[in-house]
Image (cartoon, rainbow, N blue to C red):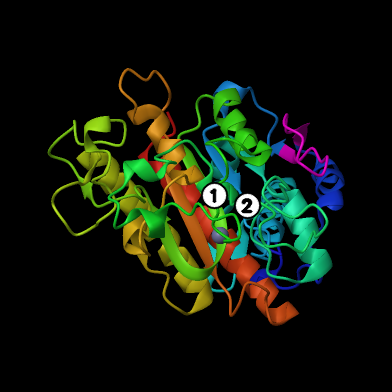
Amino acid sequence: MGTNPGGEGGPSTLLNPEEIGPVLTSLGVCTFDLPFRTHDGRFGSGGNVTCVDPEHIHIFLTAGVHACERGGPDALVQFITDLLEAQRRGIGLEYGAKTFSRADVVRVLGAGIVFVPMVNPDGIHWDQRTNTIWRKNRNPVSGDPANPNDPAWGVDINRNFDFLWDSRHFDPSAAPNIVITDPKEPRFHGTAPFSEPETRNVAWIFDTFPRIRWYMDIHSFAQTILYNWGDDDNQSSDQMMAFWNPAYDGRRGKHGIADYKEWIVESDEANLRGVARRVSGAMETVAGHQYPTQQHVYFNVGVSGTGRDYALNRHYRPGSQRNKVYGYTMEFGSSHFYPASIAEFRSNIREVCAGLMEFCLAAADIGLT
Ligand SMILES: [Zn+2]
């Protein structure tokens, strides 16, 4: 798409889980199977775009965590396709009114990108088969085994990471809206942190590519760019007031109140915010509508167990030797979880591709190591 004038053309159908592996192979990226087999027996696929040493990978992109958010996996695959096609032809990229130079393409490819277009293949398979706006994976542990339509099947992968996973970390009045313990709910957090193979697969990427510095997780359809943290307001004055400190259990999650705020280094917050604004600006240029940026806690009631906060928390744990990873959630715009038309499906893809290009360029500007 991006190598056509204005980013014209594009796919007409959704990729399904069985197509992802062959598509990545056809692109010529270095593909790998994710190590943990899903409940339905799938091995998801990932790609190392330029086949570089894992130590030279600095950007990690995921999509397809929430099964019903259609177009995310397609956009991520399109982005990689466009980058490689532009490189092959020695040209730049165009998405609507947003253009990128040939030098931008070279720079983004040089940043070292690893990506997983479909983190939740079982859920996507189920959603594409049933059209039931299915969000979770397909873990049967809490559901009626005789009824695969039971809403208690499945875990929300983006609530299952080991970051303030348990209700006890939060104020009792806030916890029920933040930590969802009812398996029937679309945001059910699972039976233990990292209980799900899909969640462990994402963590495995961070372990296997230890120099990742920038992480973007693609969702829809709220039209916003979100960044760390998701559990409470940020603060940069008291390093001890932090997620790892059990002294603050039972006090987190009531944002706007001074009894607890989440520690973040001031320059980290400035970097997070600045890059979010650049991503949003690129997407607004393509979309013609606003993409507000915000710390995640202001987007809704606050969240626990997300991949984005897990990404940064690895470095912020006391004594950690792990790389600092800035975490983002892109909520691309659409009229619904299911795009209403092929035209909307494609315009969403153009917005995401422009946002991802700008994300990688902004990351390179601030620093990849
Ligand atoms: Zn989502």
Residue ID for mark 2: 65
Sooner in the amino-acid sequence: mark 2 or mark 1: 2
Which residue is depicted at the point 34% across and 48% down? 229
CB of mark 2 near ligand 1 (< 8 Å): yes
Between 83 and 122, the residue placed more toward the observer is 122
Which residue is depicted at the point 81% across and 72% down? 12
The residue segment tinted magenta is 30-46
Between 49 and 234, the residue placed more toward the observer is 234
Instruction: Determine whether the residue tagged by mark 1 lies in a helix, strand or loop.
Output: helix
Residue ID for mark 1: 158
- x and y, in percent, of residue 234 in the image: 24, 48
Kind of residue at badge 2: Val
Residue 31 shown in magenta: yes
Quarter the N terminus occupies: bottom right
Q: Main secondary structure of the magenta part?
A: loop
Between 255 and 276, the residue placed more toward the observer is 255
- x and y, in percent, of residue 187 in the image: 54, 57
